[in-house]
Image (spheres, rainbow, N blue to C red):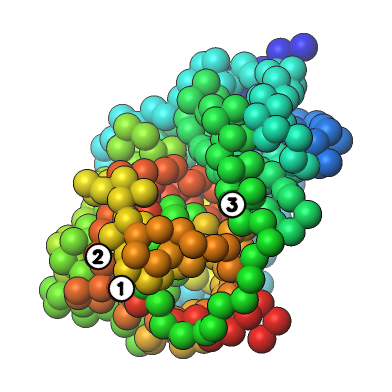
């Protein structure tokens, strides 16, 4: 049976219009913004090289925020959006607002503004069936050549409609396919990840070969003495670094509260580094507007190693006396503005060339269990995962056991620290964490402090 495509704008627009009408009936002077998300989210999960779970969810989510006489509250609804459910939604929002204190920092809803024409949608991906995903999993398993495999292959097709009481209306749609899977020997794992707007762009057979090759190369690892090593970190690690860098350093709330390391206009990072928030990139996934209806326009956050801009939602922008950058988050959000569609352009060196240029260092597949120890210097501790290898004179000489690191991410990409940027720009997309289109990096120094057990 075919999975349904995400519904068109008509149904979402009707729900939005009904909610705004109910808000007006309740209090004509109230401000309100409504976001309606509808569509499908499906996933095929496998373990021990067999599919063991196939799930699909019909997405029907209505989020409402109201402001009346300075009292602000937000509610949401999942499931059937009939008149009774929408009436309860609006009633709950006003009831919550009535008992909320006056919000002196409420910036008001977004005024009418043009939204960029972004359409990261693939019709065939919206129609992918469980059988299609099963064939993709089968190709991954077969390509692993007998190694035990596990992971998930997912497809999403979501339509979003926004409107507010100021007259701003916007709609967009997104498809996303993602593979996250491993191949395993008795002593090692190898990972392969791939995300794309189009399901057809995910080559699960090539991913299985890559995961199996890494697992075999990582088999029987040995200990490595802690210390500072040059590293090549693959795109998954780079996404982790950039996510922490922007989330803790470039967020308007972090700047406002004095927790940020960022000094705009100063060359704090390596001159080879440019980071953009750019949902218009042809390989990116995402909408052309945020949950407050603000357009997501291309924005240089770092240009040639120099921080150029701060991420804002409407609330942090109002406090800073500037405009929102379109980085609001849907629903309750203690963080303020969040990174959404981050791009680091590829460099001129293949991943193999990045390794060949190292005299003595470590090639790292993954970081995990990463935690910030000091937000001002962005010192992070975490572990390697899914394969790490010692490199000597440009050659991989042996796999090493997982290592713990304690490293300032700012220091790791400070001026003079980036020694190469890879050609392997990869999309790593997650609805909650945002989308990252990033390559591998070769860094001059990384501080490994022990093994995985200490």
Residue 213, position in %: x, y?
58, 43
- Residue 129 % position (x, y): 70, 18
Q: Residue furthest right?
A: 52
Q: Alpha-carbon distance for marks 3 and 2?
A: 25 Å
- Marks 3 and 1, the one that precedes in the sequence: 3
Confirm whether residue 157 shows in the render.
no
**Mark nearer the viewer, 3 or 1:** 3
Which type of secondary structure does the marked residue at label 1 adopt?
Answer: strand
- Whether tag 1 and tag 2 are in contact, CB under 8 A, the answer is yes
Mark 2 Cα within 10 Å, few/some/many (few <14, many 20+)?
some
Q: Is residue 275 above or below residue 290?
A: below
State the mark number for residue 444.
1
The answer to whether 297 appears left or right of 220 in the picture is: left
Q: Where 28 sits versus 275, above or below?
A: above
Comparing labels 3 and 2, the label whose residue is closer to the camera: 3
Residue at the disc numbered 3: 217
Relative to residue 399, is residue 351 depicted above or below? above
| Mark 2: secondary structure | strand
Residue at the image point whose x is 40% and y is 58% from the top: 395
Residue 388: give x, y in percent of width and height: 54, 63
The residue at 48%/46% (across/down) is 428
Quadrant containing the C terminus in the rendered view? bottom right
Please report contact status of discs 3 and 2: CB closer than 8 Å, yes or no.
Answer: no
- First in sequence: mark 3 vs mark 2: 3
* Lower sequence index among marks 1 and 2: 2
**Front residue (pair 311, 422):** 422
Q: Height in image: 273 above or below 128?
A: below
Which quarter of the figure is the N terminus placed in? Answer: top right
Residue with the mark numbered 2 = 419
**Mark 3: secondary structure:** helix
């Amino acid at each position: 049976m075919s999975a349904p495509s995400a519904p068109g704008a008509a149904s979402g627009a009707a729900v939005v219009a009904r909610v705004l009408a109910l808000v007006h009936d309740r209090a004509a002077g109230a401000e309100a913004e409504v976001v309606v998300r509808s569509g499908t989210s499906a996933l095929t999960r496998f373990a021990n090289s067999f599919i063991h779970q196939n799930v699909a969810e019909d997405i029907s989510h209505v989020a409402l925020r109201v402001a009346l006489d300075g009292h602000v509250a937000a509610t949401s609804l999942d499931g059937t959006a009939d008149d009774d459910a929408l009436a309860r939604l609006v009633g709950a929002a006003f009831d919550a607002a009535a008992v909320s204190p006056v919000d002196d920092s409420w910036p008001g809803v977004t005024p009418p503004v043009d939204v960029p024409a972004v359409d990261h949608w693939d019709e065939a991906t919206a129609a992918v069936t469980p059988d299609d995903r099963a064939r993709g999993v089968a190709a991954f398993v077969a390509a692993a050549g007998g190694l035990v495999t596990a992971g998930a292959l997912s497809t999403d097709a979501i339509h979003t409609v926004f409107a507010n009481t100021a007259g701003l209306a916007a709609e967009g749609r997104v498809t996303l396919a993602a593979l996250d899977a491993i191949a395993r020997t008795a002593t090692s794992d190898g990972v392969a990840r791939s995300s794309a707007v189009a399901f057809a762009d995910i080559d699960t057979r090539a991913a299985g070969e890559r995961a199996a090759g890494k697992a075999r190369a990582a088999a029987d690892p040995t200990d490595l003495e802690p210390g500072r090593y040059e590293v090549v970190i693959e795109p998954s690690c780079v996404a982790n670094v950039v996510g922490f860098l922007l989330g803790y350093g470039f967020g308007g709330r972090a700047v406002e509260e004095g927790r940020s390391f960022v000094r705009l206009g100063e060359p704090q990072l390596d001159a080879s580094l440019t980071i953009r928030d750019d949902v218009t990139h042809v390989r990116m996934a995402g909408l052309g507007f945020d949950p407050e209806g603000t357009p997501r326009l291309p924005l240089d956050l770092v240009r040639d190693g120099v921080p150029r801009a701060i991420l804002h939602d409407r609330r942090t922008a109002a406090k800073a006396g500037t405009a929102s950058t379109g980085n609001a988050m849907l629903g309750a959000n203690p963080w303020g503005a969040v990174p959404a569609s981050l791009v680091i352009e590829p460099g001129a060196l293949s991943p193999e060339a990045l390794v060949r240029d190292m005299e003595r260092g470590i090639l790292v597949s993954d970081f995990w269990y990463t935690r910030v120890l000091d937000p001002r210097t962005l010192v992070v501790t975490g572990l390697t995962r899914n394969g790490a290898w010692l490199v000597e004179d440009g050659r991989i000489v042996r796999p090493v056991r997982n290592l713990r690191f304690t490293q300032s991410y700012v220091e790791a990409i400070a001026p003079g620290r980036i020694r190469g940027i890879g050609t392997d720009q990869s999309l790593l997309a997650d609805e909650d964490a945002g989308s990252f289109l990033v390559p591998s990096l070769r860094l001059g120094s990384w501080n490994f402090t022990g093994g995985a057990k200490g």
